[in-house]
């Protein structure tokens, strides 16, 4: 879908499942699981992955279960959550944080509806901090659902307010994509604020 991130719109439709892969290996396993699912599935493919993702995809048949997040990187100080192409930037931010001695746990939701709240909650109970990053505008983005759920279930374990690093609340400016999109440095700034709180 060019220049938009409509995932939150689809998550408002009861009965749908919404899937967003982060790379080719996940895309194949999630797509096969989506095709075989008995429910209607919206499968969103981030365009950026067509140009930047390179992985050896297994030839055989395999599925990745819908509704199960993946912990891409273990950490102890802060939880970073995202999906799709945003995971590349989140991992870059986690590497920058590591250089400062901050251990970030990185979680790929893979499926937004249903989303793996238990995996995120377990991570936040361990780290005490949560940053959600996505390309869509911050207002009414799916990150707000994650933030609300975590605050309901982890309020006493939170060491800092939940933060969202997202696109700006403006029409998508194609010519200024780098200014609009959340960057590793914006995510790192949120990490620093969470640690310093």
Image (cartoon, helix red, strand yellow):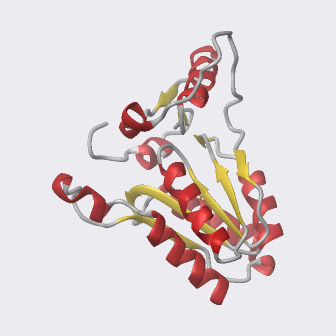
181 left or right, relative to 64: left
Residue 63 left/right relative to 3: right
Hey, which residue is sitting farthest top in the picture? 60
Horizontal and vertical percent position of residue 150: 69, 66
Residue 89 lies, in percent from the top left, at 49, 56
Tally of numbered tags: 0
| Residue in view at x 46 percent, y 70 percent | 185
Say above or below: 108 vs 29: below
Considering every residue shown, the one lying at the far front of the view is 99
Q: Is residue 192 left or right of residue 51?
A: right
Which of the image's four quarters has the N terminus?
top left
Who is closer to the viewer here, 8 or 168? 168
For residue 83, above or below residue 44: below
Q: Quadrant of the C terminus?
A: bottom right
Tell me what residue is drawn at x 80 percent, y 77 percent: 157
Most extreme residue toward the left, as rendered? 175
The answer to whether residue 139 is above or below residue 4 is: below
Closer-to-camera residue (83/57)? 57
Q: Position of residue 74 (x, y in %)?
A: 77, 57
Residue sitting at 62 percent across and 81 percent down?
Answer: 194
| Relative image position of residue 5 (x, y in whole percent) | 37, 47
Q: Residue at x 60, y 39 (%)?
A: 111
Q: Quadrant of residue 161?
A: bottom right
Residue 113 figure quarter: top right
């Amino acid at each position: 879908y060019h220049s938009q991130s409509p995932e939150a719109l689809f998550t408002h439709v009861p009965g749908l499942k919404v899937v967003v892969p982060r790379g080719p290996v996940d895309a194949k396993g999630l797509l096969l699981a989506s095709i075989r699912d008995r429910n209607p599935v919206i499968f969103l493919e981030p365009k950026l992955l067509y140009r930047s993702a390179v992985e050896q995809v297994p030839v055989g048949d395999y599925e990745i279960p819908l509704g199960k997040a993946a912990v891409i990187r273990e950490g102890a100080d802060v939880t970073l959550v995202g999906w799709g192409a945003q995971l590349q930037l989140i991992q870059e931010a986690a590497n920058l944080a590591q250089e400062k001695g901050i251990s970030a746990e990185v979680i790929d939701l893979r499926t937004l509806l249903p989303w793996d709240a238990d995996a995120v909650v377990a991570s936040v109970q361990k780290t005490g901090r949560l940053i959600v990053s996505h390309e869509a505008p911050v207002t009414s983005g799916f990150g707000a659902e994650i933030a609300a759920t975590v605050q309901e279930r982890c309020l006493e374990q939170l060491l800092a307010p939940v933060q969202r690093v997202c696109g700006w609340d403006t029409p998508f400016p194609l010519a200024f994509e780098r200014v609009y999109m959340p960057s590793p440095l914006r995510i790192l700034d949120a990490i620093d604020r969470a640690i310093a709180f």
